[in-house]
């Protein structure tokens, strides 16, 4: 039986997460096939929809059969609601939104992006009131 391979793909901060190999997002083409790839707050920083689709296409190629992709990020609607209900102050909001993001996704836009790229959503939940977490499998992997 082969050892499970797990990658945590990051943008610019190296997180602390056990059992994952950490890979900068620009180096995903060099990855071996993986059982689990975790993307944290990356898709919002890619330049356009085409760039996001190409990125997810590369991720799909790197998943083993029955492998999963996990995506976590800030939900635009939940963040706006938190500001309106004074759960988050404007300074925090500005730091979250205007820090190089090209777009703010919602849970439903992530679902759509995944489906457009051959993934099926397996599970999802809201974290900390403003973040989406989505777990999906690729229907195109071998």
Image (cartoon, rainbow, N blue to C red):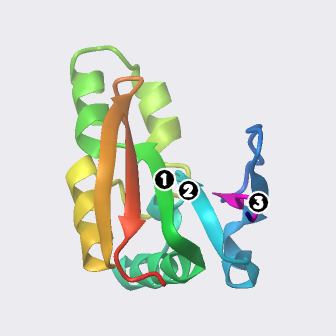
Tag 1 secondary structure: strand
Residue at 60 percent across and 78 percent down: it is 62
Q: Going by the image, does 90 lie left or right of 42?
A: left
Corner quadrant of residue 100: bottom right
Tag 3 secondary structure: loop
Q: Disc 3 or 1, which lies upstream in sequence?
A: 3
Residue that carries the numbered disc 2 in the rendered image: 39
Residue 67 belongs to the span the image colors magenta: no
Tag 2 secondary structure: strand
Q: Disc 2 or 3, which lies upstream in sequence?
A: 3
Residue at 54 percent across and 83 percent down: it is 61
Checking the image for residue 70, the label placed there is 1
User: Magenta region: which residues?
Assistant: 2-9
Checking the image for residue 3, the label placed there is 3
Mark 1 nearby-residue class (10 Å; few <14, some 14–19, many ≥20): some
- Please say if the residues under marks 2 and 1 sit with CB atoms less than 8 Å apart: yes
Q: Disc 2 or 1, which lies upstream in sequence?
A: 2
Residue at 26 percent across and 33 percent down: it is 78
From the viewer's perspective, is residue 39 above or below residue 115?
A: above
Position in image of residue 32 (x %, y %): 73, 78
Mark 3 nearby-residue class (10 Å; few <14, some 14–19, many ≥20): few
Position in image of residue 41 (x %, y %): 52, 51
Q: Going by the image, does 120 lie left or right of 48?
A: left
- Please say if the residues under marks 3 and 1 sit with CB atoms less than 8 Å apart: no
Q: Could you say which is closer to the camera, residue 15 or residue 81? A: 15
- Please say if the residues under marks 2 and 3 sit with CB atoms less than 8 Å apart: no
Q: Going by the image, does 34 lie left or right of 75?
A: right
Position in image of residue 75 (x %, y %): 32, 43
Position in image of residue 43 (x %, y %): 47, 63
In this rendering, the label closer to the viewer, 3 or 1: 3
Alpha carbon of mark 3 to alpha carbon of mark 1: how far? 19 Å
């Amino acid at each position: 039986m082969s050892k499970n391979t797990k990658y945590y793909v990051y943008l610019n901060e190296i997180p602390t997460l056990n059992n994952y190999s950490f890979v900068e997002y620009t180096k995903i083409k060099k990855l071996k096939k993986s059982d689990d790839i975790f993307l944290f707050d990356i898709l919002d920083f890619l330049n356009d929809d085409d760039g996001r689709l190409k990125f997810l296409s590369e991720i799909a190629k790197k998943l083993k059969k029955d492998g999963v992709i996990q995506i976590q990020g800030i939900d635009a609607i939940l963040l706006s609601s938190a500001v309106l209900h004074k759960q988050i102050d404007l300074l925090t909001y500005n730091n979250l939104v205007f820090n190089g993001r090209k777009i703010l996704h919602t849970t439903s836009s992530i679902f759509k992006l995944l489906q457009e790229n051959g993934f099926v959503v397996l599970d999802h939940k809201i974290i900390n009131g403003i973040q989406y977490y989505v777990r999906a499998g690729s229907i195109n992997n071998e």
